[in-house]
Amino acid sequence: MNKKTALVICPGRGVYNSPELGYLAKYHKDQKDFIQKIDQMRGMGGEVTVSELDSMEKFKPSIHTKGENAASLIYTCSYCDYQAMSDQYEIVAVTGNSMGWYTALACGEVLDYAGSFHLINTMGGMLKDGLIGGQMIYPIVNENWVRDREKENFVKNKVNEMGAFISIEFGGYLVIGGEDTVLKKLMSELPEIDRFPMKLSGNGAFHTPLFGEISAKAKELISRDSFQKPTLPLIDGQGKIWQPLSTDINALYHYTLETQVCETYDFTKAVEVGLKEFAPDHIIILGPGTTMGGAVAQILIENKWRGLSSKTDFVTTQNDEPFVLSMGLEQQRKRVI
């Protein structure tokens, strides 16, 4: 039987919330050896283990969403999901959103389990001593999830005018980074649409020039020697494909610890490249959480993939024969494992 092909997407920060509490205990009891290794490395650093975080009675934003906790917790959930995928799928490429790039590197075996943990835990804990800038999010699609070019141009012009930056191109949304005072002014000048513009609590100005010092520090703490060529194609936040045979390890290290830290992460471009270059039978979004699906759907609609032209089209298709499989959704998860 021919295997179905899949583009795998690793989620970034903000996907482990109250509904996800107990994710590891519920889905990954069979991966206790890997989880135990992560716990041991966290414990050696005097940090709360991922098992402790996952097994708390209540979700506590002050604990679970802190970068130094959230990054390792999300990575562990996502990587365990990746390992749990059925061999009925041939993974043709892996990409990720923002922090998900680090998980993608782990899936592609660019770093071993200890190196992957060190990368993710180090980058997640960079803002322990205080945030650098902040982030907000704003939609650039209409209620049918169709991109509004006029609105997009207006928002981007405002961002440039005020000295903010586009942190992430996230499907039908722009994640905007900058100094808090700049973001506050920008939020007051953008038209209100439902709950937007929305400040992203606890986030620094990731993927902007404000993170230059973070990049320099990261290169001091993380060795280039821990990187190797990927074992499968990886698509980064510029839409570049890092192939197993042709990857320049120095360039991959530079991109990971400098370019994507200080420049826009174009998740939209990454997914578009994955679709057009690999034409997968499915997109599989690793857990935890379910918040990535909307952005992915908006990218499909923008590209009229499989004839999709609206939110209604996407919902209908997903109900009949889903193209996007989110492992954070019980019914879709069953199709993956």
Image (cartoon, rainbow, N blue to C red):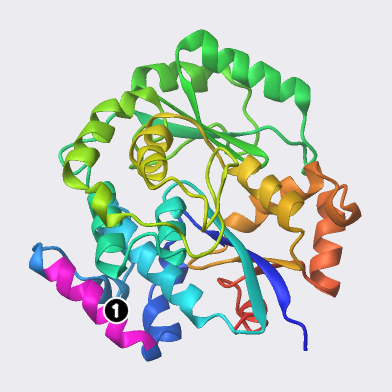
> Residue 281: horizontal and vertical position, in percent?
77, 68
Q: Choose between 177 and 262: the one closer to the eye.
A: 262
The residue that appears at 37% across and 23% down in the rendered structure is: 209
Residue 144 visible in rendering: no
Is residue 42 within the magenta segment?
yes
Decide: is 177 above or below 277: above
Residue extending furthest right? 307
Looking at the rendering, which quadrant does residue 336 occupy? bottom right
> Residue 5: horizontal and vertical position, in percent?
71, 71
Q: From the viewer's perspective, is 313 left or right of 288?
A: right
How many marks overall? 1
Circle 1 residues within 10 Å: few <14, some 14–19, many ≥20: many
Quadrant of the frame with the N terminus? bottom right
> Residue 30: horizontal and vertical position, in percent?
39, 91
The residue that appears at 87% across and 52% down in the rendered structure is: 308
Q: Choose between 193 and 241: the one closer to the eye.
A: 241
Residue 89 visible in rendering: yes
> Residue 129: horizontal and vertical position, in percent?
15, 39
Which amino acid, by three-letter code, is at mark 1? Ile
Q: Which residues are magenta?
A: 31-43
Residue named by callout 1 = 35
Q: From the viewer's perspective, is 312 left or right of 334?
A: right
Decide: is 287 above or below 150: below
Is residue 5 within the magenta segment?
no
Q: Main secondary structure of the magenta part?
A: helix
Residue extending furthest top? 161
Decide: is 212 above or below 231: above
Quadrant of the frame with the C terminus? bottom right
Q: Choose between 257 and 43: the one closer to the eye.
A: 257
The residue that appears at 19% across and 36% down in the rendered structure is: 217
Secondary-structure class at tag 1: helix
Q: Choose between 33 and 290: the one closer to the eye.
A: 33
